[in-house]
Image (cartoon, helix red, strand yellow):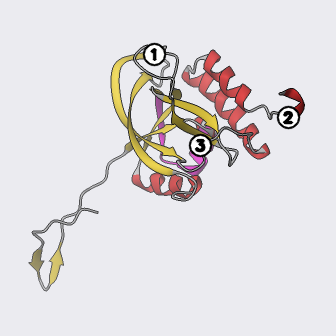
Amino acid sequence: MLVHEDSQQSQGSTMTLMEERQEIIYFAYGSNLSTRQMLKRCPSSTPIGLGHLPGWKWIINERGYANIVRDAQSGPKAPASSGVFGLLYLLPPLDEDSLDRHEGVPWAYQKFKLDMSWIKDDQKKDVVGQDVTALVYIDQERVAESAPKEEYVERMHIGIEDAVENWGLDEQYAEFMRRKLVKKTENSL
């Protein structure tokens, strides 16, 4: 809420101008790739297409959930296919509050606004040169790669399939994500 210094007295009470919050863009890179899951968590959210966040890397962290970390390998010569791909949603304020609770803000994830590219619209058509600023949930404490939680694997597979089939997520990137969901055993190292 934005409170202006120039509040006015009106019939014995103070009138304060409030800033009307609008929908924001949210970038989902984990199980919220599933539009069905997002509809349950955030019933007024609207998927609008695919986004690409260069300079970051997708991992499963020590908690066993998806996270993104800065990619030390990125730079001007990094291939366009590097970075993190995810689904963009329009998110109204009430749904943002609900999503904060589902994502465990502030102990599990922290909220950031990052610049990225909107690369495909809701018809899977390429969107060229459309830069957006989106809300992204990032865990800055748990940044080492690890194995996924059992319950998370199924939700991720559903989200990946939804993103590939309905939103045009690149199959090669989807396969990269699927490989990260396979638990590593000591014998397979």
User: Is-magenta flag for residue 163?
Assistant: no
Residue 96, image x, y percentages: 46, 52
Disc 3 residue type? Val
Q: Which residue is mark 1?
A: 125
Please tell me how crowded label 1 is: few (under 14), some (14-19), or many (20+) other residues with Cα within 10 Å. Answer: few
Residue at point 32%, 48% (across, down): 22
Residue 87, image x, y percentages: 52, 32
Q: Residue 129 or 63: which is nearer the viewer?
A: 63
Left or right: residue 95 versus residue 154 is left
Residue 83, image x, y percentages: 51, 25
Residue contact at pointers 3 and 1, CB within 8 angstroms: no
Label 3's element?
A: loop
Real-space Cα separation, disc 3 to disc 1, in angstroms? 33 Å
Disc 2 residue type? Thr
- Which of the two labelled residues, at mark 3 and mark 2, occupies the earlier sequence position? 3
Please tell me how crowded label 2 is: few (under 14), some (14-19), or many (20+) other residues with Cα within 10 Å. Answer: few
Real-space Cα separation, disc 1 to disc 2, in angstroms? 40 Å
User: Is-magenta flag for residue 40?
Assistant: yes
Real-space Cα separation, disc 3 to disc 2, in angstroms? 20 Å
Residue contact at pointers 3 and 2, CB within 8 angstroms: no
Label 2's element?
A: loop
Residue at point 46%, 27% (across, down): 55
- Which of the two labelled residues, at mark 1 and mark 2, occupies the earlier sequence position? 1
In the rendered structure, which segment of residues is drawn in magenta?
Answer: 35-49
Q: Which residue is mark 2?
A: 185
Residue 7, image x, y percentages: 12, 72
The image quadrant where one finds the N terminus is: bottom left
Give the label on residue 143, or none.
3
